[in-house]
Amino acid sequence: METLEPILAQHPFLAGLKKEYMDLVVGCASNVRVNADDLFFHEGDEADKFYIVRSGKIVVEMHVPGKGGVGIQTLSDGDVLGWSWLFPPYKWHFDARALELTRAIALDGKCLRNKCENDTGLGYELLKRFSQVMENRISSMRIQLLDMYGEK
């Protein structure tokens, strides 16, 4: 039986992770397929996974009164989606919807949290990697806000 280990080991997000940690991560991984216009997750629901996008496009949306869902970011091949599984109360803060057929690797957040509790080295490695993802997203959002609200 093939595992997702070779794919995950080559992904930049997990590249260089110790073999013992990779084995733990792979145990929480599964392939998913999300059709166009279907949700990966909905704001307020339990945040129980994160995703490594293999192919497709996803829009992260926030609800704006009077406007409905407004796209704040588009993710595609190679991107990482979701970090709310890391932080209590483990609820999604946005919606994420597939713009086209999207294939991803889902990583079970509860499974990973339990493994991180038992192996703080794994927890530290994942937290460092997610911190970088968050920093990149915040920088991107800052640029978008400057474009929208900057002086003309």
Image: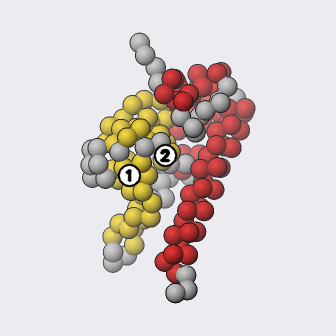
In this picture, is 128 found above or below 64? above
In this picture, is 2 found above or below 61? above
**In the depicted view, which residue is nearer to us: 56 or 120?**
56
Query: Position of 133 compared to 52: left or right?
Result: right
**Which residue, given by chain and number where applicable, does mark 1 sit on?**
58
- Whether residue 107 appears in this view of the structure is yes
Query: Position of 140 compared to 42: left or right?
Result: right
Query: Position of 6 compared to 125: left or right?
Result: left
* Amino acid type at image mark 2: Asp
- Badge 2 density bin: few <14, some 14–19, many ≥20, Cα 10 Å: some
* Quadrant holding the N terminus: top left
**In the depicted view, which residue is nearer to us: 83 or 142?**
142
SS under mark 2: loop
State the image coordinates of residue 136 (x, y, percent, origin top left). 60, 55
Task: Name the residue: 64% across, 49% down.
Answer: 132
- Whether residue 38 appears in this view of the structure is no
* Amino acid type at image mark 1: Ile
**In the depicted view, which residue is nearer to us: 91 or 6?**
6
Label pair 1/2, CB-CB below 8 angstroms: yes
Task: Name the residue: 37% across, 40% down.
Answer: 55
Numbered mark located on residue 79 in the image: 2
State the image coordinates of residue 13 (x, y, percent, origin top left). 58, 39
- How many angstroms separate mark 1 from mark 2 (CA)? 10 Å
**Farthest residue toward the front?**
152
In this picture, is 33 found above or below 21? below
State the image coordinates of residue 98 (x, y, percent, origin top left). 33, 50
Colouring scheme applied when the structure was drawn:
secondary structure
The answer to which quarter of the image holds residue 150 is bottom right
